[in-house]
Image: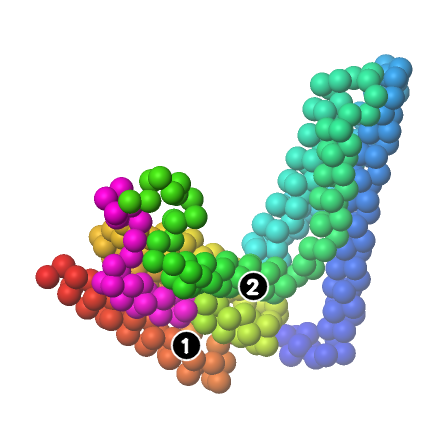
């Protein structure tokens, strides 16, 4: 019996049904957002000029908006976790953004009922439209949702690196542009300069930050090229990768901030250890997941070695500074 069920001709109707259900789901999602946008427009127009609408009209529009809210919320609640937790989070956040926009619109109307269209009401209406438009751009499956997370994290790490490099290149004093000329004396401004020892430490930490960016870029490519959604286990593995990768950017930011003068070497050491742990975790999860095929093992091992090498170099510099 199990052999028959595995035959392609037997499963074809189920695959067709699955694709049909997915299409229906996407249409429901689109219609729900369209309805929310339209109801927000009706609500705003109804209260755009005096006199205010009748009590009966207020009841009707309130019921209509409430119906669209419930329909939109159902899109999220009906999305099973088995389709991917990352996808659910994306849909949840987008749904909440639309609902937040509706709340702001209602508050704007309630603050000045019966008056002409206010700037706040106009902006709130536009906020609902923008949230609904963004909703339509959401990923349709978990792989795309995870790729969105990884790409965003890689961008944040790149920004942190560029800011640090720019600060190092522009001037000896990274805070010079925010200090008054009258305060720019050696005694009052000595804690805003990097020493040579600081710059040596920063250079080693930059290597660890670059390894963070490289790990995210390589992981993005592996997910894009190798990931599948065939089983719940593989979908869950993608969620694990996204959850682990989300920790990289905040850890890089913490390290970068601790490197600005006056450099607190204890804080640097702590943040280095935290980032190293995060990177090792990401690489270990990657290595054990289905996105790491045979061709990817080499870069995972290379970056694991690079992380350890950078840790040793940073530890050596910190030890020399403390001696």
- At horizontal 17% and vertical 61% (from top left) the residue drawn is 321
- Say whether residue 158 is left or right of residue 20: left
Asked if 279 appears above or below 52 in the picture, the reply is below
Tell me residue 139's x, y (percent).
Answer: 67, 59
The disc, 2 or 1, on the residue closer to the chain's N-terminal end is 2
Of circles 2 and 1, the one toward us is 2
Q: Quadrant of the C terminus?
A: bottom left
Is residue 230 shown in magenta?
no
SS majority, magenta: helix
Residue at label 1? 300
Asked if 78 appears above or below 43 in the picture, the reply is below
Query: Mark 1 and mark 2 in contact (Cβ < 8 Å)?
Result: no
Which residue reaches farthest front?
182
Tell me residue 8's x, y (percent).
Answer: 72, 79
Residue at label 2? 151
Range shown magenta: 186-212
- At horizontal 55% and vertical 59% (from top left) the residue drawn is 152
Q: Quick one: SS at disc 2?
A: helix
- At horizontal 42% and vertical 83% (from top left) the residue drawn is 298
């Amino acid at each position: 019996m199990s052999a028959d069920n595995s035959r392609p001709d037997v499963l074809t109707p189920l695959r067709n049904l699955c694709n049909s259900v997915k299409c229906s789901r996407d249409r429901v999602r689109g219609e729900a957002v369209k309805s929310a946008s339209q109801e927000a427009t009706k609500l705003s127009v109804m209260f755009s000029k005096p006199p205010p609408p009748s009590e009966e009209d207020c009841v009707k529009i309130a019921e209509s908006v409430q119906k669209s809210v419930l329909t939109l919320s159902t899109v999220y609640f009906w999305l099973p976790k088995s389709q991917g937790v990352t996808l659910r989070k994306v849909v949840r956040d987008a749904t909440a953004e639309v609902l937040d926009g509706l709340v702001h619109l209602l508050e704007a109307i309630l603050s000045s009922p019966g008056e002409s269209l206010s700037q706040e009401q106009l902006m709130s209406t536009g906020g609902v439209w923008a949230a609904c438009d963004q909703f339509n751009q959401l990923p349709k499956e978990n792989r795309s949702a995870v790729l969105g997370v990884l790409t965003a994290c890689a961008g944040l790490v790149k920004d942190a690196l560029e800011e640090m490099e720019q600060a190092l290149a522009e001037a000896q004093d990274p805070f010079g542009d925010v200090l008054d000329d009258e305060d720019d004396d050696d005694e009052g401004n000595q804690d805003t300069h990097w020493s040579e020892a600081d710059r040596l430490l920063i250079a080693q930490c930059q290597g660890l930050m670059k390894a963070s960016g490289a790990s995210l870029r390589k992981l993005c490519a592996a997910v894009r090229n190798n990931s599948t959604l065939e089983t719940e286990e593989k979908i869950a593995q993608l969620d694990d990768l996204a959850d682990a990768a989300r920790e990289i950017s905040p850890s890089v930011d913490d390290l970068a901030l601790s490197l600005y003068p006056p450099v607190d070497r204890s804080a640097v050491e702590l943040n280095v250890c935290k980032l190293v742990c995060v990177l090792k975790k990401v690489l270990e999860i990657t290595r054990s997941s289905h996105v790491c095929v045979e061709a990817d093992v080499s870069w995972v091992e290379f970056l694991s070695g690079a992380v350890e090498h950078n840790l040793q170099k940073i530890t050596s510099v910190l030890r020399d500074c403390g001696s």
